Image (cartoon, coloured by chain):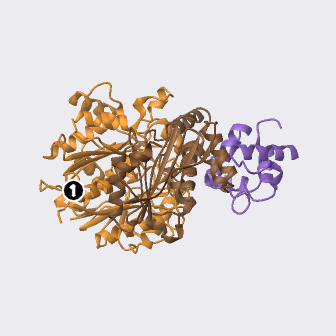
Chain colours: A purple, B orange, C brown
Amino acid sequence: MDELIQELKEKIIAQLNLEDIEPDEIDASQPLFGDGLGLDSIDALELIVLMERDYNIKITDTSEGRNIFSTITTMAEYITANSNRNI
Amino acid sequence: MQKITISGSNIISSLGFTSEENFQNVLSGQSGLKFQSKDAPQPLSKIDAEIFQEQIMGLGLSKKLTRFEKLCILSINDAVSQSSIDIKSEDCLIILATTKGNIGLLETNNERSKAIHLWESAGKIAAYFHASNKPLVISNACVSSVLAQVVAMRMLKSKQYKNIVVCGADLISDFIISGFQSFKALSPLPCKPFDLNRNGLSLGEGAGTLIFTNENSKALFGGAAVLAGASSNDANHISGPSRTGDGLANAILSTLNQSKIHPGFISAHGTATPYNDEMEAKAIALSGLQEVPVNSLKSFFGHTLGAAGIIETIITLFAMDKSIAIGTLGHEEYGVSEKINLISKTVDLQFNSFLKIASGFGGCNAAIFYSK
Amino acid sequence: MHIINYCSIRKGKIANAERVLFSSDEYQLSSFLKSYYKINKISYPKFYKMDAQCKLAFIASEVLFTDFDREKYKDEEIAMVFANSESTLSTDMDYWESAQTIASPALFVYTLPNIMMGEIAIRNKIKGENLFFIAEDFDSNLLLQQTELLFQNNPTKIVIVGWVNYESEERYLARLFLITKTGDGMLFNKENIEKLNKD
């Protein structure tokens, strides 16, 4: 799980062009949206792209996405439960 | 002051090839939104390919022109044919308004070709009509053809030209469909503007042309004149509509400030995405226009992007002339938090002026005001 | 109409009025703009999310607004008239490539030329009129005429006039002008625009 969380931090930084942020600066339990990392609606859509491309998980309902992308931990938990890829 | 009136119009869409035909189909409650195949993920509003081909043959258009350019030429040609203007004259300007023009060309050949440039398309269209002046091209997302009307009005008021032909057009392409899909913005069923169960927009394609004139020539639509218009920016987010509606309200209030009168009707953008309709209702209320009858025509034509503003303006000009309020097809249960006077069923209604509004990516908003 | 300030970005050089602010042997636009961003300690994380053309417009606007008394004007009093020749062709191609596998919404949003005005509007809280034109070449007549028309309509008091065109990392050009209706300073006319464009 820790490995997946670290991997997600790096992927999110790359996918969302968060250039000034280092993986270690992100707390896996801090909210991704709102006050936390301050991501916006386009970032949320890009996270859906990331999930499909790298973990083969399709999220069609954006309201479902809101819960999955709550924090990096919730993302990791969802991936572990749903991924077709062997982690 | 000299009035700026309309001397010709055309709509080409899934609902027909003239303004009149489109209006009649809207009046009879017909939607152009169709599932193009059995397993299509969403309905689209597409121009009939066979009739389009016949019309092109009729004009003997060169094979070198793209489908987009042919569409614009057909639309302008029909509008000009109703009018007495001389499109070749130095007193006449063509303004092309489009969001993505020839973007479909990328699909067969993903490279930087001259043909894909909008100024190149506009040049070919102007050359077909032997226009004297270099055409203007406005590309301002989904407000393009409302903005083009505003620009035409300003240029005519300052007497720079006697006639301005505004053509707004956009085509459906995989580029456009995939983009809106990536935004999860497409409704799996025909869109339901301002409805409780709305869940996205439906795409359409089409063209609309209006010929604006400040000469004393034959005026269509009972002499309706364009009085005022404005644009604004939300300064909030590059894709999400403002949560307060203040950006669109700024464009509306700036327009009303010029028109000095309140509109008798509003043709809304009404894309049927959850956030757009919510924002728009707030903007209408913020502008003090809660009581004014409002409709959205997106469920007839789909969202035709850069063409939407002008197509919807033309339908509303017809409706005003014939004292009819077109209902918002597909609307069943009111579903935005702010109360506005949404017209769901087509009814007889006399109004002497109307406001056409639009909003788009980049936080842009635009409004135009017509009066009898 | 008077020019309060103007700036340009071309061939590895950022110039404000007659002063070269920043130059680099590195013509490659993206790394060049990033160096400027870092050296000038601009703190605006959204910058990294923009496509190259918007970055070009954004940095140019940052330069243009140096010393501008923004607070003197209401949000609605500042308008923008922009134009270019490419629309967003480079990003269109990048987006279409992404769509062959999984379409990227973050690229799709930049396939509209007016997004650059949206970015500048958000950064500077500008809520006035905005117009985007496409023309084959830099067209001073068009920009002059449209600016003049905006001043005839309230509430516009300031117009940002821009030509921002990105073809590739080596071929790019931004020219921005900050214009007032009345005041002093260089006249905003065809002759002066063309003179400044030679820089």
Q: Is residue B310 something one can see in this rendering?
A: yes
Q: Nearer the viewer, residue B336 or B232?
A: B232
Q: Amino acid at mark 1?
A: Lys
Name the residue located 64 percent from the left edge and 36 percent from the top edge.
C26
Q: Decide if residue B183 is in sight here.
A: no
| Quadrant placement of the C terminus of chain B | bottom left
Q: Secondary structure at mark 1?
A: loop
Q: Is residue B277 or residue B1 the one in the foreground?
A: B1
Residue drawn at point x = 54 percent, y = 65 percent: B243
Q: Could you tell me residue C38's position as x and y percent? A: 69, 50
Q: Quadrant of the N terminus of chain B?
A: bottom left
Vertical comparison of B209 with B58: above or below: below
Reply above or below: B137 against C117. Answer: above
Q: How many marks?
A: 1
Residue at (40, 30) in percent of width and height: B115
**Chain hosting mark 1:** B
* Tag 1 residue: B159
